[in-house]
């Protein structure tokens, strides 16, 4: 199965001005999320065509594949936890 691929540079588009966000909305939104890293938030994605489900570990992806795809293939797992 072919590995999923994204180009390293995506095509640019003209920027649109945000005319609705106020400073208050921005400050509220900042409290709803935060930046994370691979050590704090492991993400493993099933890279089979049309699937792309997210899992917290490689073992969970493999269990998903065995159950839902009837496959034991260990390739095509997208992750930032290498």
Image (cartoon, rainbow, N blue to C red):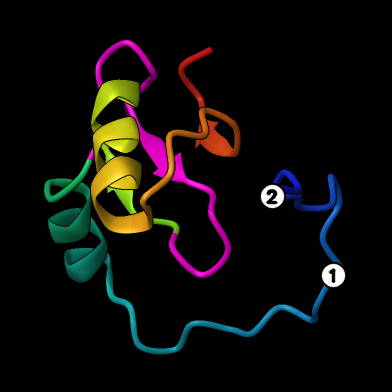
Q: Residue furthest front?
A: 70
Q: On the image, numbered disc 2 is attached to which residue?
A: 4
- Can see residue 35? no
Q: Nearer the viewer, residue 25 or 33?
A: 33
Q: Residue 32: image x %, image y %?
A: 13, 50
Q: Nearer the viewer, residue 82 or 77?
A: 77
Residue drawn 35% across and 24% down?
A: 58
Q: Is 65 one of the magenta-colored residues?
A: no
* Majority secondary structure of magenta residues: loop
Identify the secondary structure beneath mark 1: loop
Q: Residue 56: image x %, image y %?
A: 23, 30
Q: On the image, numbered disc 1 is attached to which residue?
A: 12
Give the crowd class for mark 1: few <14, some 14-19, many >=20 residues within 10 Å.
few
Q: Nearer the viewer, residue 32 or 22?
A: 32
Magenta highlight range: 34-51
Query: Which mark is in front, 2 or 1?
Result: 2
Q: Residue 7: image x %, image y %?
A: 84, 52
Q: Nearer the viewer, residue 28 or 1?
A: 1
Q: Residue 39: image x %, image y %?
A: 32, 10
Q: Residue furthest bottom?
A: 19
Q: Is 46 one of the magenta-colored residues?
A: yes
Give the crowd class for mark 2: few <14, some 14-19, many >=20 residues within 10 Å.
few
Please give left or right for residue 66 compared with residue 4 in the image.
left
CA–CA distance in space, label 2 to label 1: 21 Å
């Amino acid at each position: 199965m072919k590995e999923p691929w994204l180009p390293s540079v995506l095509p640019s588009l003209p920027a649109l001005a945000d005319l609705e966000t106020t400073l208050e909305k921005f400050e509220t939104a900042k409290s709803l999320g935060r930046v994370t890293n691979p050590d704090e938030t492991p993400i493993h994605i099933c890279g089979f065509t049309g699937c792309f489900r997210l899992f917290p570990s490689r073992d969970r992806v493999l269990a998903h594949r065995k159950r839902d795809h009837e496959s034991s293939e260990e390739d095509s797992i997208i992750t930032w936890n290498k």
